[in-house]
Image: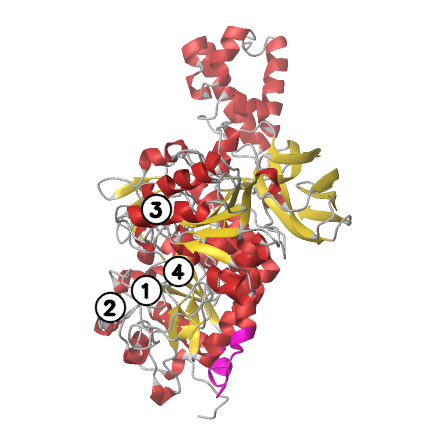
Amino acid sequence: MSENTYPSVNDLTLEEKASLTSGGDAWHLQGVEAKGIPGYMITDGPHGLRKSNSATTGEVDLNNSVPATCFPPAAGLSSSWNPELIHQVGEAMAEECIQEKVAVILGPGVNIKRNPLGGRCFEYWSEDPYLAGHEAIGIVAGVQSKGVGTSLKHFAANSQETDRLRISANISQRALREIYFPAFEHIVKEAQPWTIMCAYNCINGVHAAQDRWLLTDVLRDEWGFQGIVMSDWGADHDRVASLNAGLNLEMPPSYTDDQIVYAARGGRIQPAQLDRMAQGMIDLVNKTRAAMSVENYRFDIEAHDEVAHQAAVESMVLLKNDDAILPVAGDAKVTVIGEFARTPRYQGGGSSHITPTKMTSFLDALTERGVDAKFAPGFTLDLEPADPALEAEAVEAAKGADVVLMFLGLPEAAESEGFDRETLDMPAKQIALLEAVAAENKNVVVVLSNGSVVTVAPWAKNAKGILESWLLGQSGGPALADVLFGKVSPSGKLAQTIPFDINDDPSTINWPGEEGHVDYGEGVFVGYRYYDTYNKAVDYPFGFGLSYATFEVSDVKAVKTGACTATVSAVVKNTSNVDAAETVQVYVAPGKADVARPKHELKGFKKVFLKAGESAEVSFDLDDRAFAYWSEKFNDWHVESGEYAIEVGTSSRDIAGSAVVELDGDGKTQQLTEWSNFMEWRKDPLGSQVLEKLRAEGEAGRMPIVPDNDMTRLFLDSMPINSMSVLMGADGKQIFEYMLAEYAELTK
């Protein structure tokens, strides 16, 4: 076989086909060397390469990996609202995979932040599926542009760590389609990830790895997915059922290839299905051959660190800046308090834990830039009680400072893969220290380090400035120095609402479930969709973020471009003397609808960098999905006719202007039956014709007359027509039969 002629499934024995559907070991695909199929390595992401030093032996060691660039996890990078920057991160990750001979990097994870206590919120992008999909696609497209594969995960509805290996996420079809699927759907349709990783959990009682509706009917047949589906590590509990459902690859191997062989011989697996699953594995290997054949490649460590630096800069969200305390003046006397400034929490815990190529703390960055600042650690990075000596030292250091930079947040022990948080609060010893320092010096800026939101309101009065820095990756120190000292203006926007209290979140009543299941009872009302619709007060809204500059968004216009499409435009102007970026956000607000819909939903965004005084026009094309909801009646997307407001602003609650478009709708109608009520007949184009003919026949004396008064209409409108005899006796039965007969004539 020549180097350029690769095998197909037709060249393999039954046993070889079966072997391809399970890994070679914990970190390698199964090769068939005799047939020219190598066993390439696949390993963790999602915010950088985590290749274990023991990966060549197939062992699992999460804390012993080769050096790689640690980019900001999704908790931070999502706040950049900058898909182009995220694409650059993806390209850099791919180059590191090429050096380390890794064919597929496992990420990104686009599960929805259903509840801010979720243990892997630091790995996921947003509470909003549109934002998650339109940002994370940059990782997929960037990585794959270099010939390395990605694994979009965890498909689907993996929004908690509690009982994650087996819990059933019980979710309505509408919530799946509108909230938990769209990020996956967008990335599949637009970027075709080479692999998708299915989740551990069940969905409505069926394990994701064994769910043919999920893996074949929706993913492949509806969305057109062309790659392979692999299990999360240990998520495949029945290889035969999983392969029949559409799972190409079990990871890690359970050494049960014989089960596939016996099932194929016994007719429990059809030959065509096994061939499809095995051929997918061959196709994946062939896609990666070119990149995996590059020898002696070395990525540019400094260039990648600079990408991580820029990503960290754009990840930060300025929440509060009273008295313009930021940026810190160049001649200010600065005191830095908090162990995070010296020992940064730059990533989350668990399978994504990276050994960085370099690590620069905020204190390191100050030293490198010649900034003379006092430092006191103030507390230890654990969950132990406060140390009075450290607290006293910190309070003393704050005396006389022009500004006190306090680095507070969540230690790694408080949030990680493997468990969910129990509270939104930061450790009490940190809050007590903040109060003590603020009593001594009012000029305090809090810099937060955390993978998901923390409560801010209870302690915010003790800080003039609050900078949410999330987890910033290996170059967070220099990035923080850039922002805090004004080299660059913060430009991040919240990808997650900050509530006042965890009990304000609509999912909390069902969190984290019971007796092996969790009910997603809030339906489509997740995050700001709930808070904004029901006018629930929040601390900081979705999409919020301050700047050192000021901006004005004006001249909002919307034009209908089709029956269910529109274009919206606006002008954004930098009204300050500071060069900076603003993110223009577009929300669609439906009018009266047949189903309960959120007040508005994000359907477009654009980050615009403007020099002082500069302005720019931005425009957005809104397709039919921007106006649609998932109709369980039609089992399809549905755009109703009527008015839609298109809102343009800088957060979900800072709307600068709006415009209304009148859409025709998609014209979908449902077959009328005896179980359709009178109102449904009246609204239907054909049903209304039947009722008009019925009225005319009644006036002519050939049919009974349907009573037309408020009380009768009240009952009729909600009554299936097969029950009309309850109100009208024999006349009702005659009318019911007439309506069905006339409708049948019209639909022949």
Helix, strand, or loop for circle 3?
helix
Q: From the viewer's perspective, is 170 left or right of 539?
A: left
Q: From the viewer's perspective, is 373 left or right of 570?
A: left
Task: Pick whichever, 533 or 319, lies toward us.
Answer: 319
Q: How is the image coloured?
A: secondary structure
The residues tagged by marks 2 and 4 sit, at their Cα atoms, a distance apart of 54 Å
Task: Pick whichever, 494 or 204, lies toward us.
Answer: 494
Looking at the rendered structure, the kind of residue marked 1 is Leu
Helix, strand, or loop for circle 2?
helix
| Coordinates of residue 16 in the picture (x, y in percent) | 31, 80
Looking at the rendered structure, the kind of residue marked 2 is Ala
Residue drawn 48% across the image and 51% down it: 335
Residue drawn 63% across the image and 42% down it: 586
Q: Name the disc covering residue 391, or none.
A: 3
Proximity of marks 1 and 3: CB atoms separated by less than 8 Å: no
Proximity of marks 1 and 2: CB atoms separated by less than 8 Å: yes
Kindly report which numbered mark, 2 or 3, lies closer to the viewer in this rendering. 3
Q: Which residue is mark 2?
A: 263
Task: Pick whichever, 613 or 164, lies toward us.
Answer: 613
The residues tagged by marks 1 and 3 sit, at their Cα atoms, a distance apart of 58 Å
Query: Does residue 530 appear in this view?
Result: yes
Helix, strand, or loop for circle 4?
loop
Proximity of marks 3 and 4: CB atoms separated by less than 8 Å: no
Q: Name the disc covering residue 343, or none.
A: 4
| Coordinates of residue 614 in the picture (x, y in percent) | 77, 50
Q: Which residues are magenta?
A: 287-302
The mark nearer the N terminus, 1 or 2, is 1
Label 3 neighbourhood size at 10 Å, few (<14), some (14-19), many (20+)?
many
